[in-house]
Image (cartoon, helix red, strand yellow):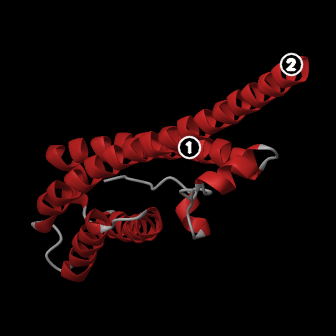
Amino acid sequence: MGILWIFLVLVVSFLTWVMGIYNNLVQARETVKKGLVQVDVQLKRRHDLIPNLVEAAKGYMAYEKDTLEKVIKSRQIAVNAVNVQDKIQAENTLTSALRGFMAIAENYPNLKADQHVLRLQEELTSTENKISLARQQYNEEVNRLNVSVQSFPDSIVALKTGFEKAAFFQLEQAEDRQVPQVKF
C-alpha cells in the first residue's frame, strides 16, 4: 500500500510539474501576441499619418509624383500585410520609401517651413520612436518564448503540445536600422 501512495505522489508531482511548464509556455506565447498587437498599434498610427503628410506635401512637390506614389503604395502594402514576415518586409519597404520622401523633401524650402507639415513631422518622429520601443518589447518576449521552447525540459512539453518558436521583428537592411531623419 505504501508503494502505491509513493507512485501516486510521484505521478501527481510529475503532472503538476508538466502543467506548470505548459502554463508558462502559454503565458509566453500570449505575451508575444500582445507584443505584436502593440507593434501593430504603433504601425497603424504611422500608416494613418502618412497620407496626411503626403497630402500636405503634394502642393509643394508637384514634380515628385513618383516618390509620393511610392510612399502611398508602400503604405498600402504594409496596411494589408497579414503575417509577421509580411509585415516585417512591408514595413522595411515603407521605411525606405519614407526615407526617399524625406530626402527629396529637403529640397523644398516652402515645405520645410509649413507649420502643418512640421506638426506631422513631429508626430511621425514620435511614432517612429514608439514603433522602435514596441518592436524592442516584442522581440524581448519572442526571445523569452523561443528560449523556453528550445530549453530542456520545456522543449519536450513544447514539442508535445505544439508550441513553436516565434519570429523576431527585425530589419533586413543595414540602413533600415537607423532612425529615419525627418526634417523639413
Location of mark 2 (residue): 1
- Residue 131, position as x, y percentages in the image: 43, 46
User: Would residue 107 be visible to someone looking at this image?
Assistant: no
User: Which element is circle 1 on?
Assistant: helix
Residue placed most toward the observer, 110 or 84: 84
Crowding around mark 2 (Cα neighbors within 10 Å: few <14, some 14 to 19, many 20+) is few
When asked about the image quadrant of residue 167, the answer is: bottom right
Q: Earlier in the sequence, mark 2 or mark 1?
A: 2
Please tell me whether residue 74 is drawn above or below residue 137 in the rendered image: below
When asked about the image quadrant of residue 6, the answer is: top right
Location of mark 1 (residue): 136
When asked about the image quadrant of residue 13, the answer is: top right
Residue depicted at x 66% and y 50%: 158
- Residue 38, position as x, y percentages in the image: 39, 41
Q: Are the residues at dot 2 and dot 1 in contact (C-beta closer than 8 Å)?
A: no
User: Which element is circle 2 on?
Assistant: loop
Crowding around mark 1 (Cα neighbors within 10 Å: few <14, some 14 to 19, many 20+) is some
